[in-house]
Structure formats: structure tokens, C-alpha cells
Amino acid sequence: MDTPRGIGTFVVWDYVVFAGMLVISAAIGIYYAFAGGGQQTSKDFLMGGRRMTAVPVAVSLTASFMSAVTVLGTPSEVYRFGAIFSIFAFTYFFVVVISAEVFLPVFYKLGITSTYEYLELRFNKCVRLCGTVLFIVQTILYTGIVIYAPALALNQVTGFDLWGAVVATGVVCTFYCTLGGLKAVIWTDVFQVGIMVAGFASVIIQAVVMQGGISTILNDAYDGGRLNFWNFNPNPLQRHTFWTIIIGGTFTWTSIYGVNQSQVQRYISCKSRFQAKLSLYINLVGLWAILTCSVFCGLALYSRYRDCDPWTAKKVSAPDQLMPYLVLDILQDYPGLPGLFVACAYSGTLSTVSSSINALAAVTVEDLIKPYFRSLSERSLSWISQGMSVVYGALCIGMAALASLMGALLQAALSVFGMVGGPLMGLFTLGILVPFANSIGALVGLMAGFSISLWVGIGAQIYPPLPERTLPLHLDIQGCNSTYNETNLMTTTEMPFTTSVFQIYNVQRTPLMDNWYSLSYLYFSAVGTLVTLLVGILVSLSTGGRKQNLDPRYILTKEDFLSNFDIFKKKKHVLSYKSHLVEDGGTDNPAFNHIELNFSDQSGKSNGTRL
């Protein structure tokens, strides 16, 4: 292959395509601000009035999963570590089944808006508050990384002002979230997925044409050791193996799909439980499609630059900029297409950030405002929800400034989710699957799980694992014409998967660093979940957990599973059940005995509150 010629630059048409995507996203927000009488109540604003159907919700779930971290991070991950990343296809299947069959039935039948309402219904106010605060911290951290990622790509590719791009993302998202609520978020996601698919498709088609066919790309990948699918090494310290991706990945992603407010809020906004489950299963197809596209882009990247790696040759300053570099290299003869790809990365960001802002507003209103200010009208709550969207939009932009200090984006993002999401998932699993778990066990378990996962997560950032744990594959620069000074490597690129600011170099390695801190980042979530569960079970048993009276609606029952088969017989049952509960909503749920009293007079439905 010839050495690639100089890469192109952005032209007017690229800016037009890009601006068009932003304008249409904002227009959808304006439409839903006024359509159907606008956002009259906080339920309309936060839950789309609970009238959504499966397909747009499924597309929205896929879009919010596919942030710019996926668009930019996954191809560079495959380029450097190989296609073992595609084993995540199995992981996504397990994640969707667990979310749909374990977590969804319980959240849906309670008719709640915030998943943390469940924690008060099942345990007490204190557990709910801890869960809410952890979620808010986790989401603002993650959203900062997600806003910063495409801004970095834009800056690298087009010379866009970095902070101008960061602020633009935050402002457009905040604008349509604040105006249109969840409906606007879901329908802009549907539009943005179209843009993302078009962006990926343009890159893949052109790469196949330029490299001389799919077989050439796969042969190059094979010769370069990139088709390394089956690594069955059981060592939990190895960064990516079949087992770390299946086991660790399932824990990490279930904490997002099963209990994270951003995702749960979407599927419980569906009009029936059947539609809610359907949305998750349809979304699985979307996840597979995105994974296939991003892995293939990574292989195309390798095929194109196998003799001249732009990262080692100093043409880009971070691995996450490889995709935009490829785009300007192969699409420079097609005005508008580089703009389409940047719009694709940006769409991923908008969808993720908007779902985060909407979820943060929902949690704040339902968990921190409603329980303490009961006199507020629905109209006031709707205004407060919109105000909170603005506040969180500003906070996320601020967080992006901190994210600029982070290293490789994909790992940074998943590490944040693992460290905080794992203990939270352990807490919900304790409530839903362990009938004798009590509030003391839940609280102690959460603290233990959080402490342990924070310890390993922060340790791994300060003392990063050695290259033999991460197994980066060989990159070549023999085909490059440019000369460069080999010793002149920047610190930001030297250890690309760590937070370079906190890194400590030339330190004597201890067994703690080589073992505990070298644990694969995908296991952070599993460690947090399992420690929370184990400690929670032991403490609950030793503090009289078996003696409590428990309403069976708060745990997963055999009926929840069997109801999958009678959906066509009893459609109305789901709706009437939910509508009677939406009144209570779980905003004022003290101890269990009050709930028992309250429910006995609701048209005689005591629902077997005493076991």
C-alpha cells in the first residue's frame, strides 16, 4: 500500500451538514415543548406521560448507549488490542435478558419514576438518599467524559475551538432537554441514530473501496494478529479475555441497563410492560449492529495504517483521534462526508448527555424535592424539572473540563461506571432477589462495596497495570516517510489508558500493584456488586432480617416470570395495576407497616402485604 497522502480539511459543506444536525435536534425539542399541550406535569416532562411505544424507546436505548466514546473509542480499541472486543456481542445478550426478566418487572409494576424510589419502598429513606447521591455523582462524571470526547476529535480534525465545541454540545442538549422533556430526548435519539448509522456506513464503504475489498481488510487484520477472538486465559488480571468480557462486561453493562436511571426511565415510560420488554429486546439488535460497525472500522483502521501508525508517528496525539484522522484521510474527496462523521460522533454525545440530564432532573425532583415539599403543584414540579435540566447541563459542561485530564476515553468511562455502578447494582439485587435483606444490611453492604471498588479503581489509575497485562498489539511505522525523534514521546500518549495527571512513574512495583491494582477494569463492577451482596446478606441475617414483613411486590416472584406467557390474555391487568399505583408512586413511603395500612383501603386491594 502506498503511504497515505496528506489528510484533508473541513470545507463549507462539512460545516453545513454538522450545523444541520444541531438545528434539527433543537427543532425537535421546540416541537415537543408545544405538541399535545406541552409539558403540563412533571410526569409528562420526565416520563413522556408513560405513553411511549417499544420501537422509539428501543432506538433511544441504543442511542444513549452509543456515545462518542463508542464511535471514537471502540475502533481505536480494536486497532490497538484486536477484535476480541467483539465478544461483547454475547455480553449484551446476557445484559438484556437479565434487565428484562429480573429488574424491569419489579420497577414496572410499582409504577415509579425514579429507580431510587424503590430503595425507600424496600428499605428506608437513608438507603434511597445514598443511592441517589451516588447516581448523581456517577452520571455527572461520566457525562463530562462523553462531552469532552467528540470535542477533542473535532479539535484534532477540524481545528474547531475545543472549548467552543464542549460548550456547544452542552448548550444544545440542555436546550432541547429543558424544552421537550423525555419525549424530545427519545425522538432526537431516533433522528441521531440515523445520523450515526450514515456516518459509520460512509466510512466503512469508502474504506472497503480504498483497501480493495473486505477480504483485504480481514487478511491484513489476520496478518497483524488483530483477529484474536478466542483468548480463554482465566487470569482476571488480563485486560481483555473471553472471561473478563463475558463476566466483567455483564456486570458492568447490567449496572447500566438494569438499574441506571437513564436507561430504566426510558423503558418504564412505555405504555405496557410488554412494550417495555420488547423495547429492550429490539435494542439488542441495535447494540449488535453498532458493535459490528465499530469493530469493522477498527479493522479498517489497521488495514489502512498497518505500515505507518499515525499515533506513533505523532500525526495524532491520542488513540481516540485515529478515527477522525482516518475519516479526513479517506473521505477528503467527498465534501460533506467528513462533516457527516463528525455529526455522527456528536450525535452519540447529544443522545447520551440528553438522557443523563433528563435522568438527573428526574432523580432530583422525585428523590430530593417531592418528598420534602409536598405542597408543590404538578405545574410547579414541571417548572422545577426544567430548571434542574438547565443546572445539570451547566454542571456537565464543567465536568468536561475535568475530563480533559483523563486518558483513554473508553476505559475511563467504563471505570467510572464500574466503580460506582457495581455497588448500586449490588444494592438493587439485594432488594429484588434476597427477601430477608433489611435496611441495615443494605446500607453496610453498599458502603463496603463502594469502598472496595473505589480502592481498586483509584489504585489502578495511580499505579497502572504493566503492558503484559494489557497486551497492546504491535504497531509499525516503517512505511512512514516522516522522521521523528523516538525519545520525544509525550506523557499523555505514553500510558494511554490511565489518568496521566495522577500517574506515578518509576515506582518500585509491589505485589499489591501487580495483582490487586492490575485487575481488569471490567471487573471493578463485579467486585463492587459481589461485595455489596455478600456483606448485605451477612449483616441482614445477623440483624434479624428474617423477621420482617415484606410486601411481595418489592421482590421478583414466580408470577413475574409466568406473566410473560399471559400477555395476550390479560393486557388490561398490567395497565390497571400500574395506574392504581401511580397515585402513590412511592414518594411518601415510611416503614412497611404504614404501607400495609395505606394499601388496605385502596378499593380493598391489600395485595397480600403480609407474608
Image (tube, rainbow, N blue to C red):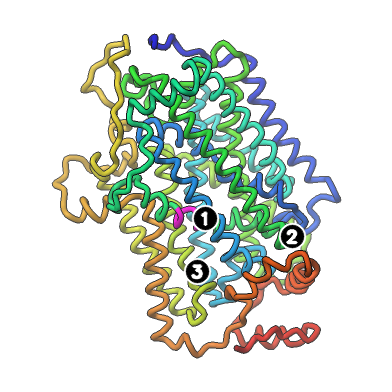
Q: Position of residue 196 (x, y in %)?
A: 61, 33
Distance of mark 2 from mark 3, alpha carbons? 26 Å
Q: Is residue 201 left or right of residue 377?
A: left
Direction right: furthest residue = 37
Amino acid bearing label 1 = Val
Residue in the picture at 67% in, 66% down: 564
Q: Are marks 1 and 3 in contact (CB under 8 Å)?
A: no
Per the image, label 2 sits on a secondary structure element best described as helix
Distance of mark 2 from mark 1, alpha carbons? 28 Å
Q: Which residues are magenta?
A: 250-255
Identify residue for label 1.
Answer: 95
Q: Nearer the viewer, mark 2 or mark 1?
A: 1
Q: Is residue 440 left or right of residue 244?
A: right
Residue 252 located within the stretch drawn in magenta: yes
Q: Position of residue 371 (x, y in %)?
A: 64, 71
Q: Position of residue 334 (x, y in %)?
A: 60, 13
Any mark on residue 43, and which? 2
Residue 140 located within the stretch drawn in magenta: no
State the image quarter where residue 305 is shown: top left
Identify residue for label 3.
Answer: 429
Amino acid bearing label 2 = Lys
First reached walking from the N terminus: tag 1 or tag 3:
1
Q: Position of residue 43 (x, y in %)?
A: 74, 60
State the image quarter where residue 322 is shown: top left
First reached walking from the N terminus: tag 2 or tag 1:
2
First reached walking from the N terminus: tag 2 or tag 3:
2
Using the image as rendered, state which of residue 58 and residue 312 is in the foreground. Answer: 58
